[in-house]
């Protein structure tokens, strides 16, 4: 089924790679429920839904694409789901999940159509990099603000109350995780969460399960699954939310797949276009699955690179990772005991990772770098991704035209500019 001989690998190598990938990304079972619970989701159901999303998503990647990439609810986009769409915009949980499902279906249709190739070819790379960086600042800010490590007084930001044990624990966690990153420790995020959680016990922040032990049957996800509300589907705001989820899903996938294929070596990277199509289809189906489960969007995890670097080349690696998440389903008390203060440093690390594409922007070219930095600053400070991208996109078009370089604008850029202009016009009307 997985064509191991064709990929010059063995079952032992693939299984070992799957275990490695699981160890690198298992932190999602603590981080995702903690983040989504801040928006009112039931933690127990969120844990089970997160694990099921990882199992189903990784199985889809294994069986549809035969690729060693594990899938789970994405870090970053989960914070946007919780803090921007639900808490800031006032969407109910069913309304936000409905937007995820619609975005997943659109992602699937795009993955099957020639539009996918046009998007990959025509969207300005500088704006792609900038959105990633802007969302990175947003994600780091969400971690610090919602853990009270950063607070606002009279509208101005400042450090939180360092007398608070939970705030002190956030900074302890940052120091621990930063030290592990400096030591090039492969599982720095996971180890940082574990060690910070342990430190939080004597500080009174981490509350251990009182009874029932560390293992249990999986909590029911019924409170979340198949719970939709499409009442806003005809409104411009709903379209904006869908657009944000869709845009982030496509470019998260694109960036992730390109990076993972490059780890495989020159031979695999040369064949990426053939495999990219199946990878996109699998990722879009996984996103639909997360919507049906009632949580934030699934995406392929960059941590899959640890398994790929260990020799994983086929879907057997992803299948092994899915099996590990199946075992973890019975460890809910362990993961639910982890406080948000121990998860916040992981969000800061995710934000740091997402800033790295900014180094690929050509700052010698003002028509590329100025709109890009507008995206970064506007998203990071306003938390309005679609509006920020619309303003920067129109600025990009205007600067290219004013500099006499309109020939660099392709049809896709112009059509998207029309859509963004119409959206801004509607908002101002």
Image (cartoon, helix red, strand yellow):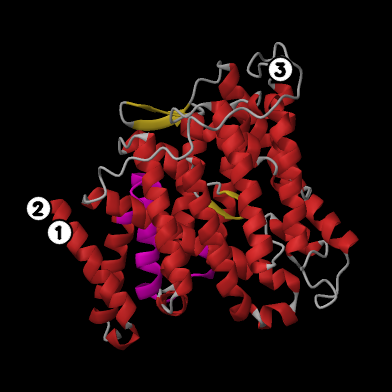
Tell me how far mark 3 sits from mark 1, CA to CA.
52 Å
**Mark in front: 3 vs 2:** 2
- The span shown in magenta is 357-386
Query: Is-magenta flag for residue 66?
Result: no
Q: Position of residue 146 (x, y in %)?
A: 47, 30
Q: Which secondary structure, mark 1?
A: helix
**Which residue does the image show at 67% across and 40% down from the upper left?**
27
Q: Main secondary structure of the magenta part?
A: helix
| CB contact under 8 Å: marks 2 and 1 | yes
Dot 2: element: loop
Residue 12: percent from left, percent from top: 90, 60
Q: Which residue is mark 2?
A: 429
Mark before the other along the chain sequence, 3 or 1: 3
Residue sticking out furthest to the left = 429
Q: Residue furthest top?
A: 210
List the residue tagged with mark 1: 425
CB contact under 8 Å: marks 3 and 1: no
Circle 3: element type: loop
Task: Name the residue at 25% across, 45% down.
Answer: 232
Q: What percent of the width, then of the height, locates residue 421? A: 20, 65
Q: Is residue 94 above or below residue 60?
A: above
Q: Which mark is residue 201?
A: 3
- How far apart marks 2 and 1 lie (CA) works out to 6 Å
Whether the magenta-drawn stretch holds residue 359 is answered as: yes
Which of 302/167 is in front? 302
Q: CA distance from mark 3 to mark 2?
A: 53 Å
Please give left or right for residue 76 compared with residue 325 in the image. left
Residue 261 lies, with reference to residue 297, above or below; the image says: below
- Front residue of 53 and 413: 53
Q: Which mark is residue 95?
A: none
User: Mark 1, residues whose alpha carbon is within 10 Å: few (<14), some, or many (≥20)?
Assistant: few
């Amino acid at each position: 089924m997985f064509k191991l001989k064709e990929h010059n690998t063995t079952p032992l190598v693939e299984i070992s790679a799957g275990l490695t990938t699981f160890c690198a990304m298992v932190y999602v079972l603590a981080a995702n429920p903690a983040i989504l619970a801040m928006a009112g989701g039931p933690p127990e159901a969120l844990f089970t839904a997160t694990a099921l999303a990882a199992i189903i998503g990784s199985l889809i990647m294994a069986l549809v694409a035969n690729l060693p990439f594990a899938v789970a609810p994405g870090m970053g986009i989960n914070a946007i789901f919780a803090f921007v769409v639900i808490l800031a915009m006032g969407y109910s949980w069913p309304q936000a999940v409905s937007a995820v499902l619609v975005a997943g279906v659109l992602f699937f249709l795009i993955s099957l159509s020639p539009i996918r190739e046009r998007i990959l070819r025509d969207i300005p790379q500088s704006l792609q990099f900038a959105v990633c960086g802007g969302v990175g600042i947003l994600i780091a800010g969400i971690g610090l603000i919602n853990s009270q490590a950063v607070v606002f007084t009279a509208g101005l930001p400042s450090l939180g109350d360092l007398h608070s044990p939970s705030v002190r624990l956030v900074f302890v966690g940052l120091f621990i995780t930063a030290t592990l990153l400096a030591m090039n420790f492969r599982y720095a995020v996971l180890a940082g969460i574990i060690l910070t959680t342990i430190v939080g016990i004597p500080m009174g922040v981490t509350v251990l399960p009182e009874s029932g032990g560390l293992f249990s049957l999986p909590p029911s996800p019924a409170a979340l699954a198949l719970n939709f509300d499409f009442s806003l589907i005809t409104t411009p705001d709903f379209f904006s939310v869908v657009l944000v989820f869709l845009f982030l899903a496509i470019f998260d996938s694109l960036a992730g797949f390109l990076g993972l294929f490059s780890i495989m070596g020159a031979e695999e990277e040369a064949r990426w276009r053939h495999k990219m199509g199946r990878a996109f289809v699998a990722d879009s189906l996984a996103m639909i699955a997360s919507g049906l489960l009632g949580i934030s969007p699934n995406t392929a995890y960059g941590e899959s690179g640890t398994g790929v670097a260990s020799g994983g080349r086929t879907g057997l690696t992803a299948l092994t990772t899915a099996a590990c998440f199946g075992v973890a389903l019975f460890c809910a008390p362990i993961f639910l005991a982890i406080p948000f203060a121990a998860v916040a440093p992981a969000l800061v690390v995710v934000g740091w990772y997402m800033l790295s594409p900014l180094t690929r922007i050509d700052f010698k070219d003002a028509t590329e770098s100025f709109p890009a930095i507008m995206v970064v600053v506007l998203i990071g400070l306003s938390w309005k991704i679609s509006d920020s991208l619309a303003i920067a996109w129109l600025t990009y078009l205007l600067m290219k035209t004013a500099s006499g370089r309109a020939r660099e604008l392709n049809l896709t850029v112009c059509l998207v500019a029309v859509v963004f202009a119409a959206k801004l016009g509607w908002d101002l009307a």
